[in-house]
């Protein structure tokens, strides 16, 4: 799926895409100056070397932080590491079992991260905190939302065929 960069009168960029890696070409232009609020069921920090499928959507955070991508082809390689760890806040992750199966450690010790289990009682407050963390570190920021952050009972149309459903997602009602 192609992506499109939109620019509003308020100069707020938005990237519409079907691929998690699409923002990276735009990120290169704002390297070190932008932040990211990342709402997703997965940390998406799998190193390229450990990605069994090669699917870029499993590694965009690792790539943006420079934790992987050193052996990627150009021009992708030169775009690795454009996001400072203190300028990212992550919400909704619940892929710890899957990461353990493939021996990928969490990045919770590197970035501000609140798993889905910590958000069930008050997801709005979690979002407010995440925005505050990122706004304090960057003059502007991106918002990434992957609908796999939602519980399958509330939104069953997410996930790849054959993908194991992750328990404990968020709901539409909070």
Image (cartoon, rainbow, N blue to C red):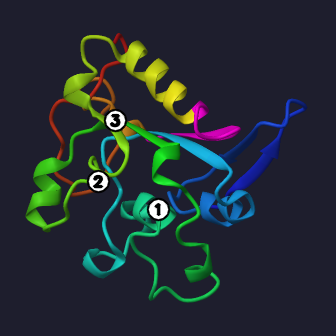
**Residue at position x 65%, y 48% in the image:** 34
Instruction: Point out the tag, 3 or 1, that comes first from the N-terminus.
Output: 1
Callout 2 crowding tier (Cα within 10 Å): few <14, some 14–19, many ≥20: some
**Residue at position x 27%, y 47% in the image:** 108
Would you say the residues marked 3 and 1 are in contact, meaning their CB atoms lie under 8 Å apart?
Answer: no
- Asked if one can make out residue 112 in the rendered structure from this viewpoint, the answer is yes
Give me the C-alpha separation between circle 2 and circle 1: 10 Å
Q: Is mark 3 on a helix, strand or loop?
A: helix
**Does residue 37 appear left or right of residue 116 in this picture?**
right
Would you say the residues marked 2 and 1 are in contact, meaning their CB atoms lie under 8 Å apart?
Answer: yes
Residue 123 location (% of width, % of height): 36, 17
**Residue at position x 64%, y 57% in the image:** 32
Residue 125 location (% of width, % of height): 40, 14
Callout 1 crowding tier (Cα within 10 Å): few <14, some 14–19, many ≥20: many
**Total tally of numbered discs in the picture:** 3
Give me the C-alpha separation between circle 2 and circle 3: 17 Å
Instruction: Point out the tag, 2 or 1, that comes first from the N-terminus.
Output: 1
Residue 114 sits above or below residue 154 on the image: below
In the rendered image, residue 91 lying in the magenta stretch gets the answer no
Residue 123 sits above or below residue 61 on the image: above
- Asked if one can make out residue 157 in the rendered structure from this viewpoint, the answer is no
Please name which of the two marks, 2 or 3, marks the residue nearer to the observer.
2
The residue singled out by tag 1 in the image is 65
Q: Give the range drawn in magenta.
A: 135-146
Q: Is mark 2 on a helix, strand or loop?
A: loop
Task: Give the quarter of the figure containing the C terminus.
Answer: top left
The residue singled out by tag 2 in the image is 107
Residue 47 location (% of width, % of height): 32, 72
The residue singled out by tag 3 in the image is 149
Could you say which is closer to the camera, residue 44 or residue 90? 90
Task: Give the quarter of the figure containing the N terminus.
Answer: bottom right
């Amino acid at each position: 799926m192609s992506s499109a960069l939109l620019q509003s009168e308020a100069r707020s960029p938005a990237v519409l895409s079907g691929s998690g890696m699409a923002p990276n070409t735009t990120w290169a232009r704002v390297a070190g100056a932008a932040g990211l609020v990342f709402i997703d069921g997965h940390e998406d920090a799998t190193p390229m070397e450990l990605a069994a499928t090669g699917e870029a959507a499993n590694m965009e955070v690792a790539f943006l932080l420079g934790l992987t991508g050193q052996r990627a082809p150009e021009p992708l390689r030169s775009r690795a590491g454009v996001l400072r760890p203190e300028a990212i806040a992550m919400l909704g992750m619940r892929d710890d079992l899957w990461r353990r199966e493939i021996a990928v450690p969490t990045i919770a010790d590197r970035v501000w991260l609140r798993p889905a289990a910590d958000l069930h009682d008050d997801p709005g407050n979690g979002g407010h905190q995440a925005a505050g963390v990122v706004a304090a570190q960057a003059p502007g920021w991106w918002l990434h939302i992957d609908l796999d952050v939602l519980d399958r009972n509330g939104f069953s149309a997410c996930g790849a065929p054959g993908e194991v459903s992750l328990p404990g997602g968020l709901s539409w009602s909070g």
